[in-house]
């Protein structure tokens, strides 16, 4: 179901993607709990939809909360945490908070370079995100 939601998001069908992720999240919260890595990841995906809809302040607030919990539960360098922090940086940059966004993007890039090396696709993507500022 998460893959279907992701495909809806990629195709620009934000209503269907959001609805699917919300359904997934309700199940995950009931079965896995609020701090499970999959639950936190789904919350991050929903925040990504908020970014796509232009609700940047709302997305940033949600992503700050998710990121803090992922750092505690998974660690700062975990791939899920890295994705959430990149989304947070994008939301901040979209609101004109470029300095904070840059700091986050730089941290994500350092972590991906250490974890994956300089030529890994995730590292290259982080470098590109930073370059967009």
Image (tube, rainbow, N blue to C red):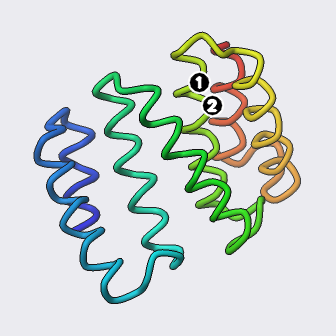
* Callouts 1 and 2 close, C-beta under 8 Å: yes
- In this orientation, which residue lies closer to the viewer: 102 or 56? 56
Q: Is 114 left or right of 128, judged from the image as shown? A: right
Numbered mark located on residue 92 in the image: 1
Q: Is 41 left or right of 64, judged from the image as shown? A: left
Q: Is residue 24 above or below residue 6?
A: below
Q: Is 110 left or right of 67, judged from the image as shown? A: right
Image coordinates for residue 48, horizontal then vertical, percent: 40, 41
Image coordinates for residue 70, horizontal then vertical, percent: 64, 64
Say which quadrant the N terminus sits in.
bottom left
Image coordinates for residue 51, horizontal then vertical, percent: 39, 31
Q: Which residue is mark 2?
A: 89
Image coordinates for residue 45, horizontal then vertical, percent: 39, 51
Q: Is residue 120 above or below residue 43?
A: above
- In this orientation, which residue lies closer to the viewer: 28 or 58? 58
- Image point 63% across, 36% down: which residue? 125
Q: Which element type, helix, strand or loop, lies under badge 1?
A: helix
Q: Which element type, helix, strand or loop, lies under badge 2?
A: helix
Say which quadrant the C terminus sits in.
top right
Q: Is residue 61 above or below residue 66?
A: above
Image quadrant where residue 5 sits = bottom left
Q: Residue furthest bottom?
A: 31
Disc 1/disc 2 C-alpha distance (Å): 5 Å
Numbered mark located on residue 48 in the image: none
- Image point 49% across, 65% down: which residue? 40
Q: Is 31 left or right of 111, judged from the image as shown? A: left
- Image point 64% across, 44% down: which residue? 85
């Amino acid at each position: 179901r998460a893959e279907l939601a992701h495909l809806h998001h990629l195709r620009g069908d934000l209503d269907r993607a959001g609805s699917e992720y919300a359904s997934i999240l309700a199940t995950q919260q009931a079965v896995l709990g609020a701090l499970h890595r999959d639950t936190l990841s789904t919350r991050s995906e929903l925040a990504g939809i908020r970014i796509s809809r232009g609700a940047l302040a709302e997305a940033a607030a949600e992503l700050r909360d998710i990121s803090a919990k992922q750092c505690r539960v998974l660690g700062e360098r975990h791939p899920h945490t890295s994705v959430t922090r990149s989304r947070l940086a994008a939301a901040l940059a979209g609101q004109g908070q470029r300095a904070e966004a840059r700091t986050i993007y730089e941290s994500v890039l350092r972590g991906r370079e250490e974890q994956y090396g300089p030529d890994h696709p995730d590292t290259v993507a982080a470098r590109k995100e930073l370059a967009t500022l």
